[in-house]
Image (cartoon, coloured by chain):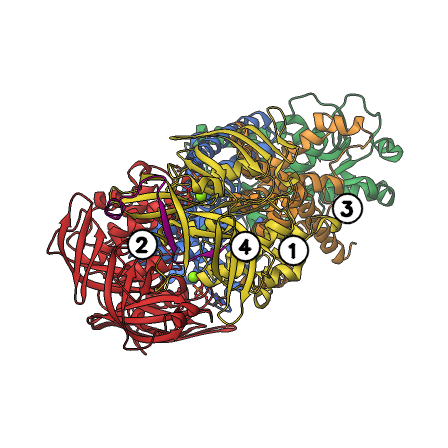
Chain colours: A green, B orange, C blue, D red, E yellow
Amino acid sequence: AVAANFTDTTKSLAELFRKETGHTLSASFGSTGKLYAQIKNGAPFDVFMAADVRRPELVESEGDGVAATRFTYARGKLVLWNPRPNAFDKGADYLQQQPFARLAMANPKTAPYGLAAQQVIEHVGLLGELQPKLVRGDSIAQTFQFVASGNAQAGFVALSQVKAWPEGKGTLWSIPQDFYQPIDQQAILLKRGQNNEAAAAWLDFLKSPAAIRIIRDYGYDTAD
Amino acid sequence: METYWEPVWLTLKLALLTTSVLLVVGTPVAWWLARSRHWARQPIAAIVALPLVLPPTVLGFYLLLLLGPNGWVGQFTQSLGLGLLPFTFEGLVVASVIYSLPFTVQPLHNAFDAIGEGFLETAATLRAGPWDRFFFVVLPLARNGFITASVLTFAHTIGEFGVILMIGGNIPGETKVLSVAIYDHVESLEYTQAHWLSAGMVAFSFVVLVTLYTLNGRARAGAFR
Amino acid sequence: METYWEPVWLTLKLALLTTSVLLVVGTPVAWWLARSRHWARQPIAAIVALPLVLPPTVLGFYLLLLLGPNGWVGQFTQSLGLGLLPFTFEGLVVASVIYSLPFTVQPLHNAFDAIGEGFLETAATLRAGPWDRFFFVVLPLARNGFITASVLTFAHTIGEFGVILMIGGNIPGETKVLSVAIYDHVESLEYTQAHWLSAGMVAFSFVVLVTLYTLNGRARAGAFR
Amino acid sequence: MTSANIRARFDCRFPGFHLNVDLALPGTGITALFGHSGCGKTTLLRCMAGLQQATGELTVFGDAWQTAHTFKPVHRRPLAYVFQETHLFPHLSVSKNLTFGQRRVPANQRKIDFDDAVAWLGLAHLLDRMPARLSGGERQRVAIARAILTSPNLLLMDEPLSALDQGSKQDILPYLERLRDHLAMPIVYVSHSTSEVARLANHIVMMDQGKVVAQGPLQETLARIDHPFRLEEDAGIIVEGRLEELDEHWHLARFRFDGGSLWLRQDEKLQPGDTARIQVLAKDVSIALSEHRDQSIQNLLEARVDQIETDISPGTTLVRLMSGETPFLSRLTSRSAAQLALEPGQQVWIQIKSVALVE
Amino acid sequence: MTSANIRARFDCRFPGFHLNVDLALPGTGITALFGHSGCGKTTLLRCMAGLQQATGELTVFGDAWQTAHTFKPVHRRPLAYVFQETHLFPHLSVSKNLTFGQRRVPANQRKIDFDDAVAWLGLAHLLDRMPARLSGGERQRVAIARAILTSPNLLLMDEPLSALDQGSKQDILPYLERLRDHLAMPIVYVSHSTSEVARLANHIVMMDQGKVVAQGPLQETLARIDHPFRLEEDAGIIVEGRLEELDEHWHLARFRFDGGSLWLRQDEKLQPGDTARIQVLAKDVSIALSEHRDQSIQNLLEARVDQIETDISPGTTLVRLMSGETPFLSRLTSRSAAQLALEPGQQVWIQIKSVALVE
Ligand SMILES: Nc1ncnc2c1ncn2[C@@H]1O[C@H](COP(=O)(O)OP(=O)(O)OP(=O)(O)O)[C@@H](O)[C@H]1O
Ligand SMILES: Nc1ncnc2c1ncn2[C@@H]1O[C@H](COP(=O)(O)OP(=O)(O)OP(=O)(O)O)[C@@H](O)[C@H]1O
Ligand SMILES: [Mg+2]
Ligand SMILES: [Mg+2]
């Protein structure tokens, strides 16, 4: 079970994993909340790669996960993005001046990137002012679509998405890590996968340098 | 934070508006499909059913492209000075209308098909012109079809979600409808709130539907053997 | 990795199975609703329409609770030795059937309503028993209703997504249907693939629908004035 | 007269209407159901068919179709019903409509051939037509053919010939007579046409406001001049007898009955020696005090005045006369009756202008 | 005779059927449309109403309803149509059905009162009923009332009385006559009942296989003995005249016409001096070589044999006789004709058994 935002990264990783270990991986993508509900109701998943920390924690504490297998496999990087080149110089000023009609972010209640975006806005002290212009995507992918389709002029999206976007980089503001709490994405081995050596191998593989390189290539940080 | 009533109110407004718009738009379409002998009849009937085939999120995605600043509908609305539709309540209505079109047109089409030519001919000999016939013969005889169309459209709009989420942008008071609110609760593990909202919605719909069907059944009992 | 054909094949299988199951299940329900004078008729008609009201994901969520190891249906299926339904293809069929129920029952209900008692009485005097009447009088006269029911159900199952994703769990080869595949592509910004799949799906559905309507129109032209 | 093989007792209410009948109908021949619009004829047929739930009892040839406790469903009753509205199946062609019932009857119980029914009712050119493309009379003929193809033990017909012209009727009536006589199929027949009834019926049931006001065999009933039947223009009698000789040159045939003989128009189907039935309407019978041979009315009979009654209107009088044992009715103006000083027992001549062969 | 105020020419094809008519119909009175089942009567009415698209022309009182280039839509034509199937609106009560058309006619053009129509057709107790709960005849009466309440300039009726019993017909016919005479509303009337036609019609159109085989005013047409009309039992003539004296005691009235006088059953509506029309059927007329007063037939006229023709069957002969300038038809067996040695020019007595007042 893999959080939807990690879809393409997982595909690359799985390719390499198959070459290295001969195990094939079958991944089910979905939003973290949905995956969690499914795990609670007997989904046939061995590994849970969430987009946040809270759900793996819950899984662990509620006894659906194998204790002490939880770790941060990636850390998302939030960017302020406008698909047009040279749209702004300094992101903070851009937010201040607001030369846009719509600013997209993910839903803070359902998506970790949304929570981070909210923290950024609060950090720059514009929550009240920006409120009327905000549109919320259900997931970070939807948020990206809002911006990519031009319906929102700019938005808080994941760096990984901008990297994957084939039509040029546009204008980016890589938001300083201290503006928001880290978007740690944790994985955990589920009870059901306890005896599946491939599952354990996959978790180990995620920590390998080769995997970390791929993850970074896709625009994520990894745990220190 | 928004109250609970805001999404409820928004949802009702959206569902009512969508249903009304669709009844107005869908009725002539269904009538044409039922009575015309034009060669384009079958292709158009098929096109009307197509919104059903695409997953709502995907349909929403394409609508977003189409209605956005780079889509040709978006450019058209902008050139009219209407601005862009996504992320507005009007946008939601447009999207719902497109998505729910088949639910209105199909039952009406069937109901119109079932009206014998004889009644229309009789009405014509009794001096009723085309509009008159439509309002005073076709509409009452197709009543069942209208009720089904309204129920399916209304309920479907209430439950609709993927398209709304995509086009609406989840803006409280503007585009955050009940289904999105429930979804939010489920996603953020606030199951109790989700249960309450769902139960309320189901109970409300149940009452509305039973009332509607009972009124209809009573009226019908007198009309037909 | 899965081929493209796997989701296509799964989708068709699901849609065909769901439609078949629903025609078998929905026909007696619709018939009962149309002909019975039981007091529970209107409440049951309303219950049949309810799956429409809940957002698909939310409906999926409740189905998951119900069919899962802690739900009473789940415990029942387990006690029968059938195992659990969620995350299996069978589970998808069950969920689709519940979700699409209104799309089958409503058009059939209307079609059955429209069949004059006179034809049934005539058939009875011509020695046709209840089943015989049903198969040789009701079914052909309700043909339009069956076509609409099938189209709506089939198309809706193809486009269905929220419930499927929730109950199915996006498992390749088992529960990853086309709509989910498209969704995956859209989510991971693989727009080209998404476009291709969507276009294919729309084109295919269009051809199927036009063929269906044309055949139907041709057959009907002979039957009615 | 035939015995009562069909016993029907029904009680059925609608708002403002109450059907309450107790009937004993013969098991052969045609029973005509007569009465004003809305008097309950259709309702009675529906009760007999089992289409209308009513309390009551119905036994047909000893077979209990309905009792206080049992109710045989419609499709198990070996009957056929020709509806007032034809109810042809719109999705089936004429020929499929025709075979709908026939196919559901076991082959060994089929007494009527498909081709025969099609020929009798003149449907050969319509077999592939859809019902919506038929004229009113064509629809009615298809409905009749469809019903008789089930070879029923009881045929219920609700104004089956109302949409047909005289010619078509004349073509169809002989076949109904054939069903009645050769297949001994009892028919309950609703009709507003007194001439149809007079020609076809063996038994009459007269209804008014849901009640039976009179019933009985045709001949007996028609010869009673005090009868509540308001056949009006069609009052008359039926005489049974035998054909005696043919006058080939003038296309005439002599009909001999108890009380004399009459000349009829010749009919190909009848040969000397055959029994036959004729109808003599009261309005075609005039009375003379002496025999007049120099006139075109050639059927003159000596008769005795039996009974004299005022008729439907005060200006006319209905006279019953006996020629031997055979009663005749004559309608004349009351003034004629007075001028001729008619009184019971008087010997007169009756002049019969026209005679119709009934079968 | 009335002039042709309605001109209709139509050409319309169905598979296996071709309607091709050219008609000039009078602008007043009732035109009866006659012919076998399937001959195209309904199709012709539908063309006149504009319900059936056909090439052709139709002018009604100088108003072009259809020409080669124009086509007035049905609802703009001031006509009413009583359909063979009644087509009552199932969602409207009887009274709402009745007012459906009436409400759509401007108030100042309404010539018929709601309550009158309801009373004529005996619908008062049915006004709140839904159509599904009516009997066949009740439905037909509602359909007739609904049609006439639009006060049309042309009334098309397709077998309007077929589901009605003799009594109901007798109740309704006078009102149709009243529409015809007092409102001068032309009616085109399809009927299979020759007696209805003989009573009502002023003009007859006889159709066969989509063609008009004969048409003309009723009296002229009926008095021609070589005519293709197959009125058969109903062959006869119409005589116009005047009521002369009443015999209150015997409920009789003397009818004087050019050529003599006849006694009729008295009718409340007619007073001495009123003009009237009577129908004399050929089968009710017998011929005598001398005058016989000692019999019940009291209407005896001296007449001259005019023409002798073989009739519908070889055994019967139709004789045309002139009483003054008035023609009569008599049907007798050919043998009688021979025995009496009838020949044109001969003076005879005609004995008329019954006479029906037509209006
Ligand atoms: N829609 C149609 N398509 C094809 N043929 C038709 C259609 N309607 C009528 N016909 C045929 O046209 C002919 C004339 O039909 P029409 O209904 O005018 O007859 P009609 O004189 O009214 O007969 P009836 O007295 O039986 O009502 C019939 O042979 C009929 O079968
Ligand atoms: N479903 C019904 N509900 C209420 N009243 C009814 C219903 N069906 C018939 N009636 C009434 O019952 C009476 C008898 O109806 P029925 O149809 O038996 O008459 P009918 O003798 O066949 O008349 P017709 O000669 O006009 O067909 C009528 O007064 C009619 O109005
Ligand atoms: Mg009836
Ligand atoms: Mg007709």
Q: Nearer the viewer, residue A196 or E114?
A: E114
Task: Give residue D327's position: percent from left, percent from top.
Answer: 25, 70
- Secondary element under disc 1, as helix, strand or loop, is helix
Badge 1: how crowded within 10 Å, few (<14), some, or many (20+)?
some
Number of the front mark, 1 or 3: 1
Number of the front mark, 3 or 2: 2
- Secondary element under disc 2, as helix, strand or loop, is helix
Report, in whole angstroms, how far the alpha carbon at label 3 lies from the one at label 4.
78 Å
The answer to whether E64 is drawn above or below residue D212 in the figure is: above
- Find disc 1 in the rendering and name its residue: E99
- Find disc 3 in the rendering and name its residue: B174
The kind of residue tagged 2 is Asp
Residue extent of the magenta highlight: E335-357
- Find disc 2 in the rendering and name its residue: C132
Question: In the rendered structure, the residue with mark 4 lies on which chain?
Answer: E
Report, in whole angstroms, how far the alpha carbon at label 1 lies from the one at label 2.
42 Å
The kind of residue tagged 1 is Thr
Report, in whole angstroms, how far the alpha carbon at label 4 lies from the one at label 2.
55 Å
